[in-house]
Amino acid sequence: MKKFPLLQLFFLLLLNGFVFQSCKKEIQSEPAVDINNKLAVSSSTLLSSGSCYETLQPDWFDDSAQTPTILGAHLLNSPYSVAVMQQASQNLYGNSNGISINKKYVRFKPADETQLTQLVNLGIELYDYPLDYEVTQEGDFYDQGLPENEIPWFYTVVDPSFTPPTGIQYQLLADLYVPDDDIFLENEAFLITGNPVAPLDCDTSSPAKSITPDVPDCGEDSHWDYGLRECVPNDCPSGYVWDGSQCVVYIPPPPPPPPASKQPSGQILVFDNSRNTNVPVRQAGIVLKRFFKIDRVYTNDNGNFTSNKHFHNKVNIVVKFKNDNIKIRGLRGIRFYQMFFPIKHGIGKFSGNLNNLAPYVFNEDTDFKKRT
């Protein structure tokens, strides 16, 4: 259990531009946005900026109680597989040029603290839960069914050239193609595999709306063509499609227009009681994630961050407190391995307009109870 004096040290250093492994604090949005009040009514909220917001880590999480990570829906039929992405590209652009393995989905099982330290020092994002599930609640741990004091499996995504450390138990789970900036391709892969696809923008009537493809039964002599969105006979030769009466040469539709910028950006602040104002949180790590697409950036001197990748369909955004200036570790109960990782807080799950998210403010108050 962490001590209150450590919290005071945390914010003293935070205001001077240092972020580190320490204790977790509540997060609230700025009063102008009033996210917390809206979340008392609904778990999905349309903000004035046009972005959809869902709670990722409730503000009543505190330092003394361990809270579990909760997973939601499982991805169907491997939409990020190379074969599915190639089919999606064929449907959209008439070719699959450039679609090959660009990521590997792997997991590790360190045997002891030495191996865990070696793994953490690789600088890759590690998760104690499988990545092909939606995360509905970001907690302190995911229950893998292991003894609490045993180091769990850690999941991540690495480049194809990655060489696993010698001696650490390692498994390759899947070869992937993860598009960094083509959200249309990603959505098409989701449609092909029967996974829900959220609209490009939020609307006030249904900010959490999902679209599931309606695929009819085409019978034994035909099949559903995802490019044409209709049943086509099985006996048309390659490069031909059924036009309703005969097989004709398939002419791919024109590519969709370039997507609007979906590179999430925002600002992280902390309320300074001594100055009675919000000040920037500098050099804080920001991790953006949707299934296998992961991006890590840092806030600048003004507390601002911008992702390098395009996201759609509910991107999880987590703040992590660690840099090379200072690291403070505290024991977190029987799960001793947690002390090797930076303190984090999931600020939310966002979709819709991601270009200028509402600022998030850490409260310097040491009161852990939910504010009213």
Image: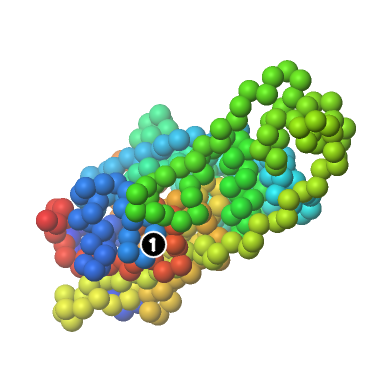
Q: How would you rate the neighbour count of disc 1 (Cα within 10 Å): few for under 14, some for 14-19, many for 20 or more?
A: many
Q: Which residue is mark 1?
A: 50
Q: Residue at x 41, y 54 (%)?
A: 202
Whether residue 173 appears in this view of the structure is no
Identify the image quadrant of residue 21: bottom left
305 lies above or below 236:
below
Per the image, label 1 sits on a secondary structure element best described as: loop
Instruction: Tell whether 245 sits left or right of 170.
Output: right
Camera-side residue: 99 or 329?
Answer: 99
Name the residue at 74% across, 24% down.
222
Q: In front: 360, or 362? A: 360
Judge left or right: residue 315 versus residue 222.
Answer: left
102 with respect to 283 (left or right): right
**Furthest-front residue in view?**
245
Q: Quadrant of residue 238?
A: top right
Compared to 139, does 34 lie above or below?
below
Q: Position of residue 8 (x, y in %)?
A: 20, 68
> Total of numbered circles in the picture?
1
Identity of the residue furthest to the left in this view: 372
Inspect this view and state whether residue 236 appears.
yes
